[in-house]
Image: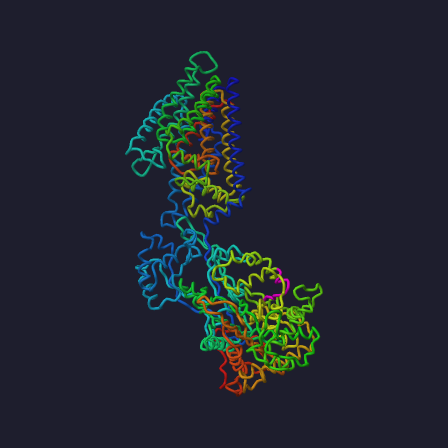
């Protein structure tokens, strides 16, 4: 009898698919987003490049490579052992902080759009250490807030403070860049993780108040750069065309609105092909969907994101592992705030924030990070019992 | 998971779902609810309209001779997109072009600025079209120079030479007709605002005055539009639509180019004749009308200007001269806008009044040297006592005192300075019988109505001027306080609202505040000649397509009939004939082989010229011919021209000579303009190549 069981176990293992343990819905949704994203990046760049005598597939090819690399990273994240993950986290955090320091050094860090957020690597590549820091913060905080060294059902104040320390150092470095869009996302993840960890409510309330106060002080004290202030001003009064930010936002809104119900058709959008919206394959990629796919298409994308987030909530609820739960919530907060900032900015609900759209925007660092995030979700899912 | 965690998770979930809902809602608003607005905004960002102008329709005379046509010109154009890319925005290129083409750099610069780029008040000469159209800096470039420019295109980036259509007034037989034809020009902001339903594109030319504006909607056709989609660098990505222009339709008028040229020459000669006789002679008008249809065969006004000047580009001096008082405001069309006292030509109205008042037209009347009216003696012309004569002779010799007496008697009968409520007012009623205050309804803009200075006129005049005259010493300038004027002011203050004896008497000989346009007088004499029909007067005959299809015809309306007995009109006709046989018109028309009927008029004008001299008399001659079976009415007027007969009368003879083919005292066979005895009714074929018919000598 045990021989039969042993053989069965053998078969089971050999019949384990590559994506064993992956949530099929999550996989399907993210795959769709990746495919749509690829088409949108291509549509945003093909016409303009061809008309100016360059390779129309330039961005398409690089985007696909980014997806493939990201996919590998996601796969790696999914299959990695929990314990290894927790063991590597400090190194991840250290590398992130180091990257964030390097980025601030003139000559090593490149200033783009008023922020020192990128390190230029040889070969024309750039990386954004803040993306790496996001992951490290989520995993690090989740680690600390899920470990119980004592017999209690909730983290102690000491645990919370430790977790905050993990977040604080990278956050301060990112504030110096300054990259307020990323700060907001990290803040959302931090507060969410602390809240769901079961820490006393006063921590959550206190942090929220701190965030609001901090934002106020930052603007008043001039810590926030003039560039950022202009972005806020332009948001409040779109007709004050300060530094061209007003122009970008206006073009974006008009482009999205002009798509109407059904859109102009993929590759057929005059606004997109005319390249009237700047940064269209990165921060404003959603305008391509708006114009060319219309309300039906861009609404569908929003629906995909909603399903993705709901699925992730479901995983967070079902898991009995506190660490996994907190990681899930951190990723959920990250994804939802990032996509709300990006699409909100495109539609005129948020000021200019400069964060890319997860799974869709062109950009290596962002694609890798979000696919790793996806991998983390699948990792938690794989460990669900039943 | 403890309860706090569960709750926190739920709260976060709700928060995130609301964020998504907000995104959905906003997306719906932008794309569906407000979608059309954004669609429009996107179109204005991404598309450009390039307008191809339509060929403007021709204006031709009754036989098809072109009065206004289009000429091919060579324009040198500048492409703003190209020169804006240069370091100096093309300043050097434009300076070199200025030298080559003999233009001013500042004019070229100004002409190539979009009107929207310039500050208010500095827009003169700006380009009203779009940046995507080549902007002409001259339309009459020399082909050799144009070739030089195009061959050295690397030296002149953004500069091109293009054939263009220029509106041209060919001036066959030296004809001018500037006031009738009008001119064209680019659209202004006011034109666009006045839109009235028409789809104007910013770079079109439209008619600005005369026939060009009156029939602009037929003449201009439809411009073609090419809509292109552009990218951010303004490169064209594709064409969205391309409609071809539709050429404008042609306007056939009732004018005859030979008659028009003759009328203009006769008028100018009359003006100069007046000057040669020592009169100021500063303006004039001549009208020739078909009395059976109301159609206008010639319409001249002096002084005039060259209608081609507008297309060539008016200089500041030319623009000022057009409206300068010193040059007698050439822009004014005196035939429709000039208001002058009709003087003795108005005696036809007095005859109608006398008939209505019961005077026997065939009886004899005294024509003394003067008539005492109140405290003043009104003199006969030349203060001559002409004895006793019948009314017909009185008209022929233009006796004034006969009318003074009748008018004075009727004024007294009506109650004098205290008019009865049932006053007959025969003289005012006689003027109204001719519909004197009604416009003739000519199809040209800005016709003035003639003025009847009757009782109600005096009342409203008094309302407006009472304050001035009753406080004359304080209000008037020193120069205006001569004894005579002080006396006049006192009188005006007391009874300026009444028709005084002097007013009534003056009215009977066409003097005083009653003034008419030359057009109106022509209409009145035509009504006498044709048996009483008051015709609307028109210049346009029909709108015709290039292939000959008639789009629309225009027929003058009957506006009314002269309210008097046919026998009175018949009497008038025989009197007017007598004028030319034995009266004041006899000398002018002696030996003329065609029978003419008419009346001279020499109107006194009160006031001084700008140079201080007293104003000279207005010279009138109103007529129709041939007397037995009249067809044409001809009226000429020369302001400050002196005597009616010698200044205007001679001019009218000149016009009849051309009309009937008379040289000296003989009719030359085949020389008459209208061999059928009337103007042509058939519409001509339209071709830019049609030339005036040569009269066989």
User: In the image, A98: left or right of B21?
Assistant: left
Q: Nearer the viewer, residue A129 or B464?
A: B464
**Residue B611, horizontal then vertical, whole percent:** 44, 67
Tell me, yes or no, whether the highlighted magenta stretch contains residue A187.
Answer: no
**Residue B559, horizontal then vertical, whole percent:** 64, 69
Magenta highlight range: B450-459
Residue B97 against residue A29 in the figure, above or below: below
**Residue B549 at least partly seen:** no
Q: Residue at 37% x, 66% y: name it.
A: B141
Residue placed farthest to the left in the image? A107
**Residue B83, horizontal then vertical, whole percent:** 35, 55
Residue A13 against residue B86 in the figure, above or below: above
Tell me, yes or no, whether the highlighted magenta stretch contains residue B458.
Answer: yes
Location of residue A243 (image quadrant): top left
Residue A329 against residue B485 in the figure, above or below: above
Q: Nearer the viewer, residue B58 or B374?
A: B374
Q: Nearer the viewer, residue A179 or A141?
A: A179
Residue placed farthest to the top in the image? A151
Residue A384 against residue B649 in the figure, above or below: above
Tag count: 0
- Check the image and tell me how it is coloured: rainbow
**Residue A300, horizontal then vertical, whole percent:** 52, 38
**Residue A309 at least partly seen:** yes
Q: Nearer the viewer, residue A380 or B215?
A: B215
């Amino acid at each position: 009898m045990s021989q039969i069981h042993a053989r069965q176990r053998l078969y089971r293992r050999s019949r384990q698919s590559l994506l064993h343990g992956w949530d099929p819905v999550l996989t399907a949704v993210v795959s769709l987003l990746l495919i749509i994203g690829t088409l949108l990046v291509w549509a945003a760049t093909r016409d303009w490049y061809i008309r100016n005598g360059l390779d129309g597939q330039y961005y398409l090819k690089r985007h696909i490579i980014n997806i493939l690399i990201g996919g590998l990273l996601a796969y790696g994240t999914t299959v990695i052992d929990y314990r290894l993950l927790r063991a590597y986290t400090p190194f991840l955090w250290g590398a992130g902080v180091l990257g964030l320091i390097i980025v601030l050094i003139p000559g090593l860090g490149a200033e783009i759009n008023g922020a020192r957020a990128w390190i230029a690597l040889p070969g024309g590549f750039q990386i954004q250490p803040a993306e790496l820091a996001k992951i490290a913060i989520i995993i690090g905080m989740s680690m600390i807030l899920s470990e119980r060294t004592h017999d209690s059902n909730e983290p102690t104040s000491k645990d919370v403070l430790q977790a905050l320390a993990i977040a604080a150092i990278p956050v301060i470095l990112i504030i110096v860049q300054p990259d307020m869009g990323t700060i907001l996302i990290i803040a959302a993840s931090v507060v969410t993780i602390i809240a769901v960890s079961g820490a006393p409510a006063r921590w959550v309330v206190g942090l929220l108040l701190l965030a609001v106060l901090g934002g106020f002080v930052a603007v008043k004290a001039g810590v926030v750069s003039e560039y950022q202030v202009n972005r806020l001003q332009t948001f409040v009064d779109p007709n004050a065309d300060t530094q061209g930010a007003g122009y970008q936002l206006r073009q974006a809104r008009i482009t999205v609105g002009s798509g109407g119900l059904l859109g102009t058709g993929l590759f057929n959008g005059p606004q997109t092909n005319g390249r009237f919206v700047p940064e269209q394959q990165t921060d404003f990629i959603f305008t391509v969907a708006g114009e060319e796919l219309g309300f039906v298409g861009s609404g569908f994308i929003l629906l995909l994101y909603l399903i993705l987030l709901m699925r992730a909530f479901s995983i967070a609820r079902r898991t009995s592992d506190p660490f996994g739960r907190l990681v899930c919530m951190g990723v959920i907060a990250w994804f939802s705030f990032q996509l709300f900032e990006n699409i909100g900015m495109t539609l005129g609900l948020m000021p200019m924030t400069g964060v890319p759209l997860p799974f869709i925007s062109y950009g290596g660092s962002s694609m890798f990070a979000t696919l790793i995030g996806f991998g983390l979700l699948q990792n938690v899912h794989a460990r669900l019992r039943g | 998971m403890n309860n706090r965690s569960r709750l926190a998770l739920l709260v976060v979930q709700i928060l995130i779902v609301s964020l998504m809902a907000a995104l959905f809602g906003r997306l719906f608003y932008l794309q569906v609810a407000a979608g059309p607005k954004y669609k429009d905004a996107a179109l204005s960002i991404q598309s450009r309209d390039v307008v191809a102008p339509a060929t403007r329709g021709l204006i031709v005379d009754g036989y098809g001779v072109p009065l206004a046509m289009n000429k091919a010109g060579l324009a040198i154009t500048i492409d703003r997109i190209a020169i804006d890319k240069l370091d100096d925005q093309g300043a050097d290129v434009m300076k070199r072009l200025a030298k080559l083409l003999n233009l001013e750099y500042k004019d070229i610069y100004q002409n190539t600025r979009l009107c929207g780029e310039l500050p208010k008040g500095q827009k003169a000469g700006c380009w009203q079209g779009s940046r995507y159209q080549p902007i002409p800096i001259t339309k009459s470039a020399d082909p050799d120079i144009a070739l030089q420019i195009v061959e050295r295109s690397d030296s002149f980036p953004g500069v091109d030479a293009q054939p263009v259509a220029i509106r041209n007034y060919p001036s066959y037989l030296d004809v001018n007709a500037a006031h009738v034809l009008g001119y064209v020009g680019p659209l202004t902001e006011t034109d666009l605002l006045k839109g009235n339903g028409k789809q104007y594109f910013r770079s079109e030319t439209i008619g600005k005055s005369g026939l060009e504006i009156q029939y602009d909607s037929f003449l201009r056709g439809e411009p073609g539009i090419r809509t292109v989609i552009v990218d951010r660098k303004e490169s064209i990505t594709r064409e969205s639509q391309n409609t071809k222009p539709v050429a404008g339709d042609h306007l056939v008028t009732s004018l005859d180019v030979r008659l028009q040229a003759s009328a203009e020459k006769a008028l100018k000669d009359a003006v100069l004749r007046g000057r040669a006789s020592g009169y100021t002679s500063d303006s004039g008008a001549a009208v020739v009308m078909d009395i059976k249809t109301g159609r206008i065969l010639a319409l001249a006004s002096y002084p005039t200007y060259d209608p081609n000047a507008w297309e060539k580009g008016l200089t500041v001096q030319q623009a000022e001269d057009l409206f300068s008082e010193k040059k007698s405001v050439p822009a004014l069309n005196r035939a429709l806008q000039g208001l002058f006292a009709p003087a003795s030509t108005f005696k036809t109205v007095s005859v109608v009044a006398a008939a209505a008042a019961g005077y026997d037209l065939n009886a004899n009347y005294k024509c003394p040297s003067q008539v005492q009216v109140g405290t003043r003696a009104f003199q006969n012309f030349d203060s001559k006592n002409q004895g006793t004569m019948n009314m017909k002779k009185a008209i022929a010799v233009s006796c004034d005192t006969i009318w003074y007496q009748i008018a004075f008697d009727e004024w007294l009968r009506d109650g004098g300075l205290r008019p009865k409520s049932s006053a007959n007012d025969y003289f005012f009623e006689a003027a109204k019988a001719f519909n004197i205050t009604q416009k003739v309804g000519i199809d040209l803009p800005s016709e003035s109505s003639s003025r009847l200075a009757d009782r109600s006129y005096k009342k409203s005049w008094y309302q407006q001027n009472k304050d001035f005259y009753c406080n004359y010493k304080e209000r008037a300038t020193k120069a205006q306080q001569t004894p005579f004027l002080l006396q006049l002011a006192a009188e005006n203050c007391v009874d300026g609202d009444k028709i005084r004896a002097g007013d009534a008497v003056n009215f009977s000989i066409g003097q005083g505040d009653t003034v008419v346009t030359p057009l109106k007088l022509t209409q009145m004499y035509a009504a006498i000649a044709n048996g009483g029909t008051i015709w609307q007067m028109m210049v346009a005959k029909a709108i015709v397509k290039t292939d000959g299809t008639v789009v629309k015809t225009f027929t003058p309306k009957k506006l009314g009939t002269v309210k008097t007995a046919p026998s009175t009109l018949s009497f008038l006709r025989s009197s007017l004939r007598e004028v030319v046989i034995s009266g004041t018109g006899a000398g002018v028309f002696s030996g003329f082989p065609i029978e003419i009927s008419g009346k001279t008029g020499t109107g006194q004008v009160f006031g001084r010229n700008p140079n201080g001299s007293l104003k000279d008399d207005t010279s009138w001659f109103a007529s129709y011919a041939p007397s037995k079976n009249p067809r044409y009415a001809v009226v000429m007027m020369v302001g400050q021209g002196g005597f009616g007969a010698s200044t205007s009368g001679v001019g009218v003879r000149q016009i009849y000579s051309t009309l009937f083919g008379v040289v000296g005292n003989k009719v030359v066979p085949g020389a008459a303009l209208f061999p059928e005895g009337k103007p042509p009714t058939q519409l001509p074929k339209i071709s830019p190549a049609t030339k005036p018919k040569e009269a066989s000598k």
